[in-house]
Every structure is written in C-alpha cells, then in structure tokens.
Image (cartoon, grey):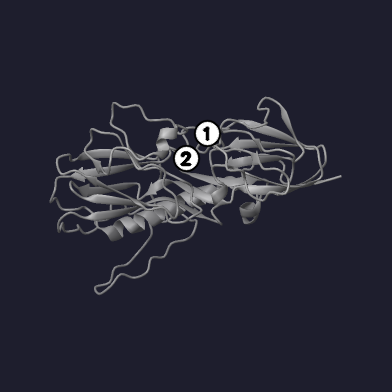
Amino acid sequence: MRTIVFVFFVITLSACSSAVMGSHSAVPDVSNFAFPFAQNRGATNWNVETGAATDSYALQDVDFYPNKITIDAGDSITYRINGVGLDGHTVAFVPPKQKIPGPLDPKDLVPQGGTTIDGKKFVNSGVLGGGLPPFEVTFLFSRPGTYRILCLFHEPAMESTVIVQKAGARYPHDALYYRYIADSEKWHDLAAAERSVSHFPFKPGGTTLAAGIDPGLVRYPPLDSTVLRYVDTRDILKVATSGNLTIKVGTVVTWVNETSNEPHTLTLNVAGKKKLPRIPPDPPVNFNRHGVTRYDGSKIVNSGTFLGGTRVRLMFTKTGKFYYGCLYHDNSGMDGTITVTP
C-alpha cells in the first residue's frame, strides 16, 4: 500500500550516530541492505507507534509505524499514541473468516478479546487516544504465522503486518532498525498530507470549505494520511488555523468532506459558547441533510456524520461570531469561527 523509504545512517564501532532525515523528502531505499541480525534473548517487547501528526495536529498519519515487523511467538507489542491531539485509533485482530466491524460501529470503542492473539479469536483494544494508557498485546507461543493488525476506525488504510516466528528464532532486525523504518514511513506519509493541501479544489477564502482533505481527494482505496481541519486554503503555512471565515448575514456556507479515510461532523453550540456540545456524533440535531439549514445561534445544530464526497450547507441568519467544530476531531483542533456581519 505504501512506498517504503528509509534514512541514511552510520553506525560507528562505539556508538550510533544521529540520523539525518529531510523533513518531507524521499530518501534512499535500503530494503536490500544487509542489516545485522538481532540475537534472541527471550521474550521481547516491541514498540509500534499508532498514528502520527505535525503542524499542530493538522496533518495526521493513519497508520502503524513500523508498518511491518517480525517477532517471535511469545513476544509482545506495545501500541502507543504519542500526543493528546492525535486522532483516536483501535488496535484489532480480526480472524480471517470474521467480518470486520464497520468504522462507526459503537462496539469498536469497547475492549474485547483480552490482550493475547492466537489467530482464532477477535481482539480489539477499544479506542486509544493521546494521554490514555497504551495497548500491549502478546502473540502466543503456539501460533507462528502472519497477522494483520488494523484500526477499526480507519481500515483499510490503517493496516499493518506482524510476522510471528517460532519462539527462540533469531530476529531479522533489532529495535533500532524498526525505529528508523518507522520514522521514515511517518515522514513519507506526513509529506503526502502536506501536499494534499495544495490540491484544495475550491476558491481559497471562499464560502466552500473542505471538511478534511487527503492526498487522494476521496480516492479509493484510502491513503495513509489526512488533514484534520476545515480547509479554506492552498497554503500549507495557513492550514493549521484555517476554517475561520467572515461573511455577510444570509450567506450560505458549504462544507465538503474531501477525504476517503475520515468521518466528520459540522456541529455548532448556541451563540456565545466556545466549546462543542457534549452530544453523540449521530443522529443529526436540528439539521437538514438534504438542503440548507438555517442557523441563528439560538439552538444546537449538528449535521451528524458525513463521509467522503458528501456535503452539508448552513445559512447564517444572524450577526455574531459563531464557533463550530467536528465532534470526532475537535481534540485535534478541527474547529473554526464564522463571523457574520450585517
């Protein structure tokens, strides 16, 4: 699903030198390089980052880093989200003959199946987020094989491979190798998210905004990065603070979900409130999904979930400054202000 790139690094006899990685540039592919094997010294815990972000959490990766890892039976992997503004994810194993739960299934939020993977039972971490405990899962001694680990919110974009060898087998790579691979993959995907901003398909600063945007602009299969903002610009330097408009009373503003990998909402509290209401994303509240909803600040308005390629429209019928955001991603800074003048 992805192009694996890597960073150049030098190992001296006494210590490892620092890695040099261009922030958003391609680097040499060393997939055939003869890295030294890592000696097995018993059951090992490995680390996999779950998602990544930059630009005040505006640019986000929806993948596991590293995306592929080889371990031994009996080893464990700790999946961790590093940052309170990172998108929420799950870590799940779905047996081959079981249907994958949908991304909006409420059961995705709940832990199930414990913390061991044997290849037979469904395992789900429940929702993980920045500031919450990581999820550690053990791959059982009796079940070598290849396992697909996925996020129930973001699959098929957010999937990874864990190859489990027999207990005691020599590892093909050590933790340092996977750390460098993970960093390379993360920056490759974040660079793709950055490039997607330049493809904003509407008039910059106009009354049609992208409710999220990704490199494929609703292309399937979904890609591994996204922008969690109400985008009104093609300037990457402005994307973190985009979504703030000044309009005339009576103007209709349109938001279009330009992603294939994220659900969003358009949600407004009553006038004067600077936080979103604590309500579920669905169902819609005081909202016309098939036309234009009129908003005067007197009541809560919520579009409900809208997916890639769909749009919502709002007419502002009263002057004032109105805060809005996405119930799924307001913790990542996906919000804005509409200032309505006479």
Residue wearing tag 1:
219
Q: Position of residue 253 (x, y in %)?
A: 73, 38
Quarter containing the N terminus: top left
Res. 236 visible in picture: no
Find the residue positioned furthest to the bottom: 14
Mark 2 to mark 1: distance in Å?
8 Å
Give the SS element for disc 1: loop
Amino acid at circle 1: Arg
Q: Position of residue 259 (x, y in %)?
A: 55, 38
Residue at screen point 43% across, 39% down:
157
Residue at screen point 18% across, 48% down:
74
Q: Quadrant of residue 101?
A: top left
Residue at screen point 28% across, 26% down:
97
Amino acid at circle 2: Leu
Q: Position of residue 2 (x, y in %)?
A: 41, 43
Q: Is residue 174 left or right of residue 331?
A: left
Q: Is residue 270 above or below residue 39?
A: above
Q: Residues within 10 Å of mark 1 (few under 14, many from 20)?
A: some
Residue wearing tag 2:
223
Q: Residues within 10 Å of mark 2 (few under 14, many from 20)?
A: many
Q: Is residue 11 left or right of residue 230?
A: left
Q: Quadrant of residue 99?
A: top left
